[in-house]
Image: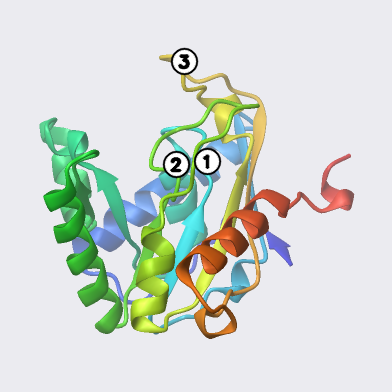
């Protein structure tokens, strides 16, 4: 099922976090109305209204997280690169939204982030992760880090694969300014249950396969 950005209030958000999330959604809705940037959300109904769940998404642009936040109807906690805490504006944004900082290449930071994510899941939160841990240029690939599969196995929480299409066309990794006129698709796949896989590597392989094979429905891609 596909839908345009809606107006229903996100569930479970604190007031400031809800305001920021709604502002993001309103901006994207306005841009879509003016045809500057269109956003189409596919199969978001697979995301439960409450209860612990993991999202694993491809990462092609710095705007990916904005489109995912706009597609959801509940609070989302994401692992985010620690560099976002250096700027006062982005620091305020990620702290309001309760994001988890990760210093890439720092094992202690990674351990702390995993502990924070585990506790968030045990508390019934939705936690989002980009397994590639960096933006990947079109036509290129990056290894999937096992964190999302480890969390799923550790907590028994299912993983919902997510694929963003054309976000990299809106704001390419190697560009400073957006290129308008594109439709960005946020496509949700069916949940992947950790008990169906014997090991973390097998589960991670399935996550990678499911993300890479999510497609824009044919009737929308004309």
Do callouts 1 and 2 mark residues in contact (Cβ within 8 Å)? yes
Q: Residue 209: percent from the left, percent from the top? A: 66, 56
Point 49% across, 77% down: residue: 158
Query: Judging from the image, what secondary structure is the residue with disc 2 in?
Result: helix
Between label 3 and label 2, give the one nearer the viewer: 3
Q: Percent from the top left, x then y, of residue 178?
A: 49, 20
Residue visible at 40% across and 36% down in the picture? 134
Q: CA distance from mark 3 to mark 2?
A: 24 Å
Residues under labels 1 and 2: Cα distance?
A: 5 Å
Residue where numbered disc 3 is placed: 174
83 is higher (above) or lower (below) than 206:
above
Q: Position of residue 38 (x, y in %)?
A: 64, 39
Q: Is residue 72 left or right of residue 93?
A: right
**Lower sequence index among marks 3 and 1:** 1
Residue 4 visible in the displayed image: no
Residue 116 sits in quarter = bottom left
Q: Which residue is mark 1?
A: 30
Q: Is 10 positioned to the left or the right of 159 in the image? A: left
Q: Which mark is residue 217?
A: none
Relative to 120, say whether 55 is above or below: above
Crowdedness near tag 3: few (<14), some (14–19) or many (≥20) residues, C-alpha within 10 Å: few
């Amino acid at each position: 099922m596909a839908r345009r950005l809606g107006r229903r209030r996100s569930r479970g958000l604190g007031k400031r976090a809800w305001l920021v999330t709604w502002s993001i959604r309103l901006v994207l809705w306005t841009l879509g109305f003016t045809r500057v940037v269109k956003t189409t959300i596919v199969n978001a109904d697979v995301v439960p209204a409450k209860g612990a769940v993991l999202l694993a998404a491809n990462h092609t642009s710095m705007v990916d997280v904005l489109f995912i936040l706009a597609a959801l109807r509940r609070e989302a906690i994401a692992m985010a690169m620690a560099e976002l805490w250096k700027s006062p504006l982005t620091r305020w944004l990620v702290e309001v939204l309760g994001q988890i900082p990760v210093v890439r290449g720092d094992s202690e930071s990674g351990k702390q982030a995993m502990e924070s994510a585990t506790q968030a899941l045990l508390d019934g939160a939705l936690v989002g992760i980009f397994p590639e841990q960096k933006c990947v240029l079109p036509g290129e690939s990056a290894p999937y880090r096992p964190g999302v599969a480890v969390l799923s196995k550790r907590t028994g929480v299912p993983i919902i694969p997510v694929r963003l299409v054309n976000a990299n066309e809106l704001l390419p990794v190697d560009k400073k300014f957006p290129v308008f006129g594109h439709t960005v698709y946020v496509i949700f796949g069916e949940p992947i249950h950790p008990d169906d896989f014997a090991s973390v590597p097998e589960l991670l392989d399935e996550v990678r396969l499911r993300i890479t094979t999510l497609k824009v429905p044919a009737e929308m891609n004309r």
